[in-house]
Image (spheres, rainbow, N blue to C red):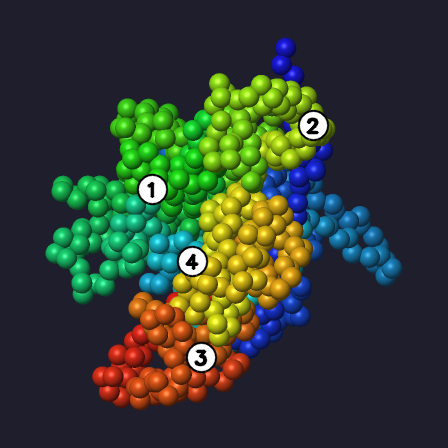
Amino acid sequence: MKKLISLTVSAAILLAPFAYTLNVPALNLKVDAVSAASEEADAPAAKPTAKPAATAKPVATPKATAKPVVTPKPTAKPVETPKATVKPVATPKATAAPAATTKPATTPKATAAPAATVVPAATVKPVPTALPVTVKENVYQDGVYVAYGDAYSKGTEGAKIEIKDGKITSIDLLRTSPKLIDRDARNNYSALWQAYGLMTNKLIGKTRDGAAAVDAVSGATRSSNGWKLSVDRAFERALTVKDTDAVYFDGVHMGIDPTGKYAVFATYESNKLTVVKVYPLNNAGDFVDEKAYTAEQSAAVAAITPALLAKGTAAEPVAGLEADFKAAINAFWDAEQNAKINNTSAYVDGFYSSYGTARSVGVERADIVIRNGKLVDVKLFRLGNNLIDRGATAYAEVVKANAPMTAKLLANGSYFANYDEKVDGISGATESSHGWNQAVERAFEKALKVPDEVKYFDGKFAGVDNQSKVLLLVDVASDAVTNIKLSLFGADGKLIADDKLSAEQKSLVGTLTSGLLEKGVQMSDITGQEELSAAAKAALTDALTNASKVQGTYKDGTFTAFGDAYDKGTNRADVTLRNGKIVNVALYRVGMNLVDRGKAAYPEVVKAIPQLTSSFLAAGTREAVQDVDAVSGATSSSVALKTAVDRAYGKAEIVEANKAAYFDGIFIGVSTDKLVNVMTYVEHGVPVKMLVYYLDKNGSTRTVNQLTDAELAVKSEIESTSTGYSLHKYGYRAAAFGNNDAEKEVSAKVVEAIKSALESAGK
């Protein structure tokens, strides 16, 4: 009879030897905000702010929201006073993601009887010593809430906050693209680059009233107020008692259909829909300029707009425009959900990732973004049996099926609940199609506001140690491991078939399998096989993490980052992560042209790279890599490569611990022809200084007496306009310049190098 490992009680003990803490180093962003008047509109003056509390480190996985509890009407003023905008009423239970479009319904009144009001006893004379009765009440339901500010053509602001005891305990400030998905800070206005950190510091730890009173960041007034409005709306959604008469937030709310065809702006005033605007989107996800509308787009907008204003999601399509109406109605539904005070989505908005059923040849993975209970972005992957993305090297039919399956899932707005491979799958890749659908379904379950008590998905999950020595296929049912299939990788990185194992290997596989089934990661090492014993236990940890219903801190994938540069080049690390562990790393010493120097690098560096590669893999985590000793004779490169690994982790964070546009440090970039190099210095998340180098075809720096007048003029312009402490003149949306054609030609290449350097510095 097979032995079971109970995971419900002892999982923490079993996994303890391989547990690790992911501490994200803080960046100092306490500097004056950069003014960017082009981004900001006039806004009402905010109340003076109290001294902000210390910044709390964001947590990637939000705590589950408890089921709403009916709260009786208090007999005295509660300690935490909400903004009195609505009449309190009981919050209904969260419902599953809507399967079909529905009209908004008024929130039903609570049926629970209010607690009896205590009536003071009659007295002839007042008692001077009597103290007033204080009724303490938790006005806000603890949990994670997402809300958005008012929309405009560039997107909108948003906030994802965790509330506990009426205060903000964690916050992720969002600034979305026109597709209403949060984007990297560097893709927003330069004034926002530091505003993220400044506003986070001001808002963390605040109550609703405290958050409303904080001052906006100078130069980022509109976005600051947008974040404050988002936070206030999130608190409104968290009220334990809501007003049944208040259905929508007043303001302009945007929505996007999952296929990215239309954006819809819906304006509500006193619960009434007053204005609807419909905008076609281009392939890049940006608004199409009205002057550039095609005749078909103009006709569609003219037909759809009044229909949505009159009937909302019940709008009836015009013949010939059925597809356009469907997309626009989905976008309107999205806007309506963002406008609702009582948003009943069963899911917490955000990024989630999960796996399908594992096989000996690999497994499918899906990275998704959920908004209002709908799938709004998805990326599909096919992993090999080493659990690393195969990309274009996967089976041809699987590669070909990726795009159409992505489109099907987005059009459906979710996974297919009753999956039919003949209808929902892609011909020629039905197994992968099913795996992708299952991965999306599991990712949705990770996003539940109120998860069940089961910690692991049922099914078959793969696990591989981070040095690809052992593959486990682990069967999990009811939070227990019911079976394990263990395979060994050969020196060539391929699995050794069972019938090709030596007698010694077969014995080892049997002993490891029985040990894992009996004791899990508490299994004792096999004498003489300590390395494979450790690998087997690490693979079990990996498999159980893949089976977990809790979202991790980092995205899986390969991330490239650089150490600090100097006038001879820089160091690069390509880091592949899975479940926060380094599963592959490639280290390079690159020249001023960003080309790998290989054996031409300094001998000490050439010698150090394989040593550091092995050490980083053995370390396995962000923190442990920083404890790796530098290689003698290559200390500076060792430090730079450790920094590069840390920055790669920074790029992989699901929720940035210190949201900013750029890493602090020194970064280089090159022009397309690799003949111009720009070195950029970043301080407090802002590029403050730039140096220009002109290179020959071998990547060596040309001397000053070899430069043309145009090259000297452009170099002088770039290097002399820096103050060294504020945003460089060409640090934001640099464009070519010059007094003549020669200078314009040179400056165009310099601008290419600037953009390359900033991309290297980007978070």
For the residues carrying marks 1 and 2, which lies nearer the camera in this image?
Answer: 2
Q: Which mark is residue 691?
A: 3
Q: Amino acid at mark 2?
A: Ile
Q: Which residue is mark 1?
A: 392
Q: Of label 3 and label 4, which has the lower sequence position? A: 4
The amino acid sitting under disc 4 is: Arg
Q: Position of residue 107 (x, y in %)?
A: 47, 41
Q: CA distance from mark 3 to mark 2?
A: 57 Å
Q: Which residue is mark 2?
A: 526
* Numbered disc in front, either 3 or 4: 3
Which element is circle 4 on? loop
Counting residues from the start of the chain, the first of labels 4 and 2 encountered is 4
Q: Nearer the viewer, mark 3 or mark 2?
A: 2
Q: Residues within 10 Å of mark 2 (few under 14, many from 20)?
A: some
Q: Give me the residue at 65% from left, 55% from top.
A: 628
Quadrant of the rendered image containing residue 290? bottom left
Disc 1 vs disc 4: Cβ atoms closer than 8 Å?
Answer: no
Dot label at residue 183: 4
Point out the frontmost of discs 4 and 2: 2
Q: Which mark is residue 217?
A: none
Nearer the N terminus, badge 1 or badge 4? Answer: 4
Lower position in the chain sequence, tag 1 or tag 2: 1
Q: Amino acid at mark 3?
A: Leu
